[in-house]
Amino acid sequence: FLININGNLMKGPEAQISVFDRGFLYGDSVYEATRTFDKKPFRLERHIDRLFLSAEKISLIPTYSKEVITSEVLKTVEASPYQNVTIRIVLTRGTNSDLGLDTELSGPNNLVIFTKEIKPNPAWWVTDGVSMIFYQKQIEASGSLPKTGNYQENILANREAHERAAYDAFLINTHGFVTEGTTSNAWIIKDGTLYTPPLADGVLDGLTRKTLIEMSKDGRLPLPLIEKSLTKKDFIDADECFITSTTRNIVPVTKIENHAVKNGRPGLQTLELLKLYLDFVK
Ligand code: PLP
């Protein structure tokens, strides 16, 4: 790890932050995750825009400008010895002067940028696909979600998936619709059409998801794409299923709960989309 804390570069073990930081005390922070392809950050501007949108949603007033965050990210990437790194940008409301929720207690933001060599995705993701469970969310959420330091439900969902020997969980909103994975967006293919849940169902506006939607609008996808509320049954009865995220691209899902997706093999159209996506973003 090479880490940048408020502009200072340091190696992983040396990187420390105050116990009064509000991100630590209350999860009072927003974050972003992207990567580089050969030293070039992927869609950095959009990730920083989304960081600021998340901040706005939790009334976190940035004391860093977009320009400064951008240059600190570039500085960290440049100093890293690796060509391909994951980049995590964490912006907390700041360090508190005392215990307490009152945001007036907070000093200026803390900005932490992590970079770490990115390893290629495990080969079995593409040869075998991953398995998912369903996880019922308790907290009512609608509209596009902010990416905050408070991922409690997603953590519990991921934990339950691992306890049940699955890769991850699809989150179900309080209206019974599938929304997304714990750190990914959710997709199915049925009868030659690609479907993904709409942001209104309580979904993070994933940039991989957005890229596929843009590719579709540009006529770059071989099948139509529809944003539509989807049930558990839609997922179980799908011809193909996959998840997307910036660091993992497109990962086929071949099992949901105890059901094989179709024949239990990664879908051919999914693998074709993965190829098209990688050609496009690289
Ligand atoms: N949904 C959630 C809850 C996430 O945390 C993430 C990314 O970490 C995604 C979806 C995928 O978003 P992106 O494609 O921008 O990585």
Image (cartoon, rainbow, N blue to C red):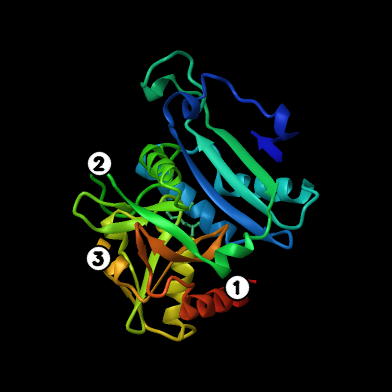
Work out which quarter of the rendered image holds the N terminus and state it: top right
- Of badges 3 and 1, nearer the viewer stands 3
Whole-number angstrom distance, CA of label 3 to CA of label 2: 20 Å
| Residue at the spot 39% in from the left edge and 25% down from the top edge | 103
Q: Is residue 96 left or right of residue 119?
A: left
Whole-number angstrom distance, CA of label 3 to CA of label 1: 30 Å
Along the polypeptide, which appears first: circle 3 or circle 1?
Answer: 3
The reply to whether discs 3 and 1 touch (Cβ–Cβ < 8 Å) is no
Count of all numbered marks drawn on residues in the image: 3
Please provide percent x and percent y for residue 211.
48, 70
The tag on residue 138 is 2
Q: Height in image: 241 above or below 88?
A: below
The tag on residue 233 is 3
What residue sits right under mark 1 in the picture? 278
Residue 229 visible, this orientation:
no
Q: Height in image: 174 above or below 219?
A: above
Q: Amino acid at mark 1?
A: Leu
| Residue at the spot 44% in from the left edge and 31% down from the top edge | 27
